[in-house]
Image (spheres, coloured by chain):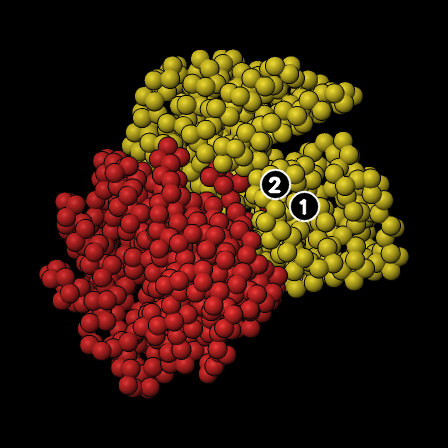
Chain colours: A yellow, B red
Amino acid sequence: MNAPDTPFSAPPLPAALLDALRTDFAERCSTALAVREQHGRDESIFDVPPPQAVVFAETEAEVARVVMLCASHRVPVIPYGAGSSLEGHLLAVRGGISLDVSRMSRILRIDAEDLTVTVQPGVTRKALNEALRHEGLFFPIDPGADASLGGMAATRASGTNAVRYGTMRENVLALRFVAANGDIVRTGSRAKKSSAGYDLTRLVIGSEGTLGVITELTVKVHPLPEALSAAVCFFPSIDAAVRTAMQVIQIGVPIARCELLDTNAIKAVNAHDKLGLKEAPMLLMEFHGSEAGVAEQAAVVQDVAAEFGGEAFEWATTPEARTRLWTARHHAYLSGLQMRPGCRAITTDTCVPISRLAENINASIAEVEAAGLPYFVVGHVGDGNFHMAYLLDPADPQELATAERLSAQMVARAIAMEGTCTGEHGIGLHKQGFLLDETGEEAVAVMRAVKAALDPAGIMNPGKIFAG
Amino acid sequence: MNAPDTPFSAPPLPAALLDALRTDFAERCSTALAVREQHGRDESIFDVPPPQAVVFAETEAEVARVVMLCASHRVPVIPYGAGSSLEGHLLAVRGGISLDVSRMSRILRIDAEDLTVTVQPGVTRKALNEALRHEGLFFPIDPGADASLGGMAATRASGTNAVRYGTMRENVLALRFVAANGDIVRTGSRAKKSSAGYDLTRLVIGSEGTLGVITELTVKVHPLPEALSAAVCFFPSIDAAVRTAMQVIQIGVPIARCELLDTNAIKAVNAHDKLGLKEAPMLLMEFHGSEAGVAEQAAVVQDVAAEFGGEAFEWATTPEARTRLWTARHHAYLSGLQMRPGCRAITTDTCVPISRLAENINASIAEVEAAGLPYFVVGHVGDGNFHMAYLLDPADPQELATAERLSAQMVARAIAMEGTCTGEHGIGLHKQGFLLDETGEEAVAVMRAVKAALDPAGIMNPGKIFAG
């Protein structure tokens, strides 16, 4: 699929820029095709020429050096973390340098008493949790991939724990970033709250690399709960499962995770992870708290589920059983892709007010069934957010067109329901039209004005969020 | 006290502007001195000439009309809600129009199933909670004053419930605001989370009226807890009380409110509200949850308090007793002022990582005791935030100078502790130097660039957050 503003043929990199990068970074500046191609592809379906060079930065000063060199030559800079974005965020649609910060992967400080940690942007969520476990702490944000914290901030990521612990928006206290002019900007502090001026932390979170390169993050972490239990419950219909989730939220149960898998997704994880789960719509839930609190929450949720025909819970009582279930959930996307070998996927990401969720999912399933495309559904239903993956034959442009039509219908419906075209994946290349539909020209004009003010030459990941 | 960039003498309002406003707003455009003076004064200690006119807007379209008229004449617009800000936010340091939105006080929608409400900016927190009570819901953000929601968003307010429910930053889902060019901008949606472009909602929250006039807010509300209990506990020292709060947070108790009053504050509320509380450092706490959950939390906290010499809890078991205690807490500021009749107060607002809180409070008390100024302390200690009010004789410039010196020392210490100069009051006129100290020139330069991009003529509440 062509990206929105391709075909575009970038002029060759200025020789002076490449010379300077090679002088400073030696073998950490690469123009090898394999390296460039690896940095020019994400989980999206776009085909775009790779970046013209890749630079591996190891310090904040090096990030600033690359940005300043590129600024002086007006060459684009595309920050690169784990490469797991879904909407074309890291594609070099205007050419330029992929600035890989994955080697900036040190956990700088764990302040257990304050429930904060400070990390470099290349630290991944799994590496962070591995380090935190020994402290009795965890970091809750868990997009499916083992994404980097810098990338997760840049796309305002969330995942399965957001229903209780919030998203990157709520869990980042402070940042350092390199602005387009090379300035190193500090935002926020380690204080839990602040009214000190514009919220630059939140401005950078979700800005998809278009305002600067994140070089450090201080995030909130949470005490590992005293008690933790996971359960699965199977329902006669998707509708029943979603209505259960809706009611659990509405009555205020502090459920920690509340995930939907449809029958197709169950089949996929059964095949991939040999789980033997009943092939019916399922909620996968987790409860965090004291022993008594967890039992109480679970009892309330069981009552609600029973009202909607949910079968008796199956408990995952051992850590191993829990890990197995949640690993399956995190594999659902890749497992689902394997249901149609060789396919590519378009994954939707609408999020609506919880009262409209069942209606949105039901209508979306009716539409995809009518269209006859293979699909599966997973959802962070406690947040009103779900993903439908359309599994496409890459050789059949008609399937792609059908998926794009279904996706556009779903987004239009979500917006009409006062929801959003993207709960957690971001705009990237794919959803620029939807962003306009959702928030209007006036708001996008404000975004453009902010971008132009902070990056007048337009070198920071240009062409993302909005063309221009 | 002179404001930072006074003396300033605003040119007279252009006659054409005044004529247009009078034509459109008739008696809702006032140049009466009493009205102007009432709109030119807040809870801060600055003496500034009042705004040159006051316009009472009743609709979003009227707000846009005022902004466009003022833009065409390059006259400042100062949004006005309840007038309860503390740092000079609404003072007319460059002259101009006070745009009073307090009559935009309709609750537009209560979406109980989604736990959201949509309000006009002049709705106050008490009016909102009055309306929500019948729905079994509440809105948690509670600055001391009965502030307007528009103003609370503009200053990123919080209050006593923030330790559990967050601040305006976490509780606003969507906004409408009139930008400096008269555009009506929509931000966010009713979805609980979104990755759709720059977070303009959070950019406006805390911007103190410098980027536009908020005309509508959609906020999260919360189910009234099934069970709720309040307790007071007295300690042998401030240090013991604060260390109790620190440990309660560190072990992850989901306490809903955790407020410190020092002996001076207790004396004040005893005198004002005839409470008969023991005159010793006190924690006032509240627990929200199920019956069993509340009992469990309280038991844990009692154990922690006992370790630090806290005397056995006194429970406020009836709603009346709870209301009496919390009303006293909300009156603490005004009660405190009455301890020195005729005084004016400077109130500090530092917030630090919780592990540094005891040290910060202890040092601050040692300094004020050494200086001999009358003071009292109240604190949202669960958040690491506390307020020290210095009670000053307005006729004695030496006292003011002493208070400013103590305040500056406290802020410098909070910043050295990786905290903030303001947890919830904002920058306004008073803390512009502290903002620079805290976040650095690079970050303030970014804020200025954003301001210049969105308000190139500098008409939106000029001179606040940063001069210029």
Residue at 19% from the left image edge and 59% from the top image edge: B328
Residue A435 image label: 2
Residue A316 rendering spot, x and y as whole percentages: 43, 23
Identify which residue, B140 or A370, lies in the foreground: A370
- Classify A205 as above or below B18: above
Whether residue B230 can be seen here: yes
Identity of the amino acid at label 2? Leu
Residue A308 in picture, x, y percent from top left:
37, 17
Q: Residues within 10 Å of mark 1 (few under 14, many from 20)?
A: many
- Which is more toward the observer, B159 or A292? B159
Residue A84 is tagged as none
| SS category of the residue bearing label 1 | loop
Residue occupying the point 31% across, 33% down: A293
Mark 1 belongs to chain: A
Instruction: Name the residue rendered at 62%, 61% in the picture.
Output: B453
* Element type at mark 2: helix
Mark 2 touching mark 1, by CB under 8 A?
A: yes
Q: In this view, does B30 lie to the left or right of A344?
A: left
Image coordinates of residue A436 in percent, x first then y, are 62, 42
Residue A226 is at least partly visible in this image: no
**Displayed quadrant of residue B387:** bottom left
Give me the residue at 49% from left, 14% from top: A280
| Chain ID of residue with mark 2 | A
Q: What residue type is labelled 1?
A: Phe
In this figure, which residue is indicated by the disc labeled 1?
A: A466
Question: Would you say B89 lies left or right of B393 here?
Answer: right
Q: In which quarter of the image is residue B85?
A: bottom left
